[in-house]
Image (tube, grey):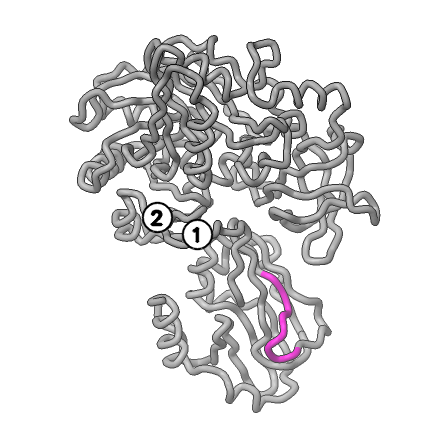
């Protein structure tokens, strides 16, 4: 699967799509494939303050538990309530199933994240390990 | 995101492979280190697999598993029965030739060396099927504790590729590939027959999925193993057979309330605590562990293995602590979403006074105390067959 070029990526396998000072965050196709059948997504409430690189939630498959790391700092403005009842949507459409929306505290943080091409290279190396 | 296995993998210096390893990798299976074995945890979504699909296939159709990592110990000779009786807790004298039973090897303390399936293959010929992670320990233990008996003890663990064919359609699938009359083989009985052109293959109507099914023992060379695996998948197409990994094997056995060594049973848990009373025959001649178990029963059992169902949103996992209010009272031995029951379930050790069905408790999941309730086990029971 090709990684959309309209967003940035982290080495912890989150994607972030920004527009001005707002952004949307989810997990990548590589992440959902590694996890397997996703059965549980836990994200913070609207208003929560996130810090770049710190955990902000959890995603669980039948077999595995995984922390979600915030690609940037900011304030949660919306959560995808749909995933509480249909977490499997993340498997079906990882790059369309966003988890949270937030207001960026420091948009310059985005510059430190990976481009689609760099992320693709990174996961190819991960898979080869 | 960082991946953390919910079930800790075993520690081993060299990784071992079954004869089907290349086949699993070729199929795109996700591989994990399971007790030192490089095993498939699940097959790809692209071929209709993944833990949930694999689990559902076994509950409603048929799935196949490579379980060659399981070990096999043969005891044969004039005193084979006496030896088996001495080292295992169930009563092997009740076995007819061709019959099998669930049993366990115990330490003198009444705790578990391992749980096993004892098969009586001939008059004086018994086969013990043991767990992968305890192969060497079990064999040494069996050999050391049977020296006074006139019987040969052989480790056949590397001689077989063991394939489990499980699910309500397993009988239909395997019957296409064998001349043995499977309808005549009852649950926990074995037979021999021609399978995929191989003569005299041991076929047991056994499994670890709480479903009907069979386990076959074929020669462990890679070529034969791959051929039989692929022939089963081809013959099973009409039943929508899928290959299944250890992920589904674990969720299936958990729904069935079946114990896993290192989780529900171990060298620190005794038979009464594990609730395996019905497989422990105190009235049979003496066996290792018996006298301690007798005393333990008289003293009273203080903790019990119970089934839990989460009543609040969250998944209990192995090792999570169980609370009554703010008091820690026990721990989860196995916990997972149950794909067929569509609930979050767990097995846990709690004090006896909390073991009654309906008792509310809390499970600590990442710092949060979430509600759960004690429920009857097994969580899942397969529907009775209407003949």
- Find residue B236 and report its image quarter: top left
| Magenta segment | A51-58
Q: Secondary structure at mark 2?
A: loop
- Find residue B190 and report its image quarter: top left
Residue B16 in the figure: left or right of residue A70: left
Provide the residue designation for mark 2. Answer: B16
In percent of width and height, residue B138 lies at 45, 33
Residue farthest front in this picture: B148
Question: Which quadrant would the C terminus of chain B be assigned to in this image?
Answer: top left
In percent of width and height, residue B238 lies at 27, 33
Residue B148 in the figure: left or right of residue A59: left
Q: Residue at x 41, y 77 (%)?
A: A119
Q: Residue at x 46, y 18 (%)?
A: B101
Residue farthest left in this picture: B197
Answer whether labels 1 and 2 touch (C-beta < 8 Å).
Answer: yes
Q: Which mark is residue B211?
A: none
Q: Which mark is residue B12?
A: 1
Asked if residue B304 lies in the magenta stretch, the reply is no
**10 Å neighbourhood of mark 2: few (<14), some, or many (≥20)?**
some
Q: Is residue B371 visible?
A: yes
The chain that hosts pointer 2 is: B
In percent of width and height, residue B72 lies at 37, 30
């Amino acid at each position: 699967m090709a990684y959309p070029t309209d967003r940035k990526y982290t080495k912890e396998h989150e994607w972030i799509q920004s527009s001005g000072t707002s952004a949307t965050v989810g997990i990548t196709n590589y992440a959902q494939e590694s996890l397997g059948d996703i059965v549980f997504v836990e994200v913070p409430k609207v208003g929560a303050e996130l810090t770049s690189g710190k955990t902000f939630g959890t995603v669980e498959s039948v077999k595995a538990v995984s922390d979600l790391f915030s690609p940037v700092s900011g304030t949660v403005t919306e959560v995808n309530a749909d995933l509480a009842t249909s977490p499997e949507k993340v498997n079906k459409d990882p790059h369309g199933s966003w988890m949270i929306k937030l207001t960026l505290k420091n948009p310059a943080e985005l510059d430190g994240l990976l481009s689609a091409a760099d992320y693709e290279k990174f996961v190819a190396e991960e898979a080869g390990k | 995101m960082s991946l953390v296995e919910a079930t800790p993998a075993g520690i081993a210096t060299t990784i071992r492979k079954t004869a089907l390893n290349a086949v699993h990798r070729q199929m795109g299976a996700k591989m994990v280190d399971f007790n030192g074995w490089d095993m498939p945890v699940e097959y790809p979504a692209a071929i209709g697999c993944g833990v949930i699909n694999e689990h559902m296939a076994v509950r409603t159709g048929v799935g196949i598993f490579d379980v060659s990592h399981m070990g096999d110990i043969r005891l044969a000779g004039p005193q084979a029965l006496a030896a088996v009786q001495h080292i295992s807790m169930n009563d092997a004298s009740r076995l007819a030739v061709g019959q099998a039973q669930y049993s366990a090897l115990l330490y003198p303390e009444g705790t578990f060396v391992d749980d096993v399936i004892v098969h009586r293959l001939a008059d004086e010929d018994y086969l013990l099927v043991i767990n992968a992670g305890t192969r060497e320990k079990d064999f040494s233990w069996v050999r050391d504790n049977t020296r006074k008996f006139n019987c040969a003890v052989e480790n056949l663990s590397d001689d077989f590729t063991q394939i489990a064919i499980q699910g309500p359609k397993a009988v239909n699938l395997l019957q296409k590939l064998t001349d043995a009359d499977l309808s005549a083989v009852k649950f926990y009985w074995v037979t021999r027959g021609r399978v995929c052109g191989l003569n005299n293959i041991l076929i047991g109507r056994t499994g670890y999925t709480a479903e009907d099914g069979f386990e076959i023992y074929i020669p462990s060379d890679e070529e034969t193993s791959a051929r039989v695996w692929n022939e089963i998948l081809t013959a099973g197409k009409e039943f929508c057979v899928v290959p299944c990994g250890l992920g589904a094997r674990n969720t299936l056995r958990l729904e069935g309330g079946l114990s896993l060594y290192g989780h529900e049973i171990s060298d620190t848990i005794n038979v009464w605590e594990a609730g395996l009373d019905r497989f422990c025959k105190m009235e049979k001649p003496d066996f290792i562990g018996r006298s301690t178990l007798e005393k333990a029963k008289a003293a009273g059992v203080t903790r019990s293995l119970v089934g839990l169902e989460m009543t609040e949103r969250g998944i209990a996992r192995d090792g999570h602590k169980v609370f009554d209010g703010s008091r820690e009272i026990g721990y989860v031995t196995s916990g997972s979403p149950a794909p067929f029951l569509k609930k979050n379930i767990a097995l846990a050790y709690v004090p006896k006074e909390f073991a009654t069905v309906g008792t509310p408790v809390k499970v600590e999941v990442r710092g949060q105390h979430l509600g759960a309730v004690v429920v009857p086990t097994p969580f899942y029971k397969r529907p009775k067959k209407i003949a």
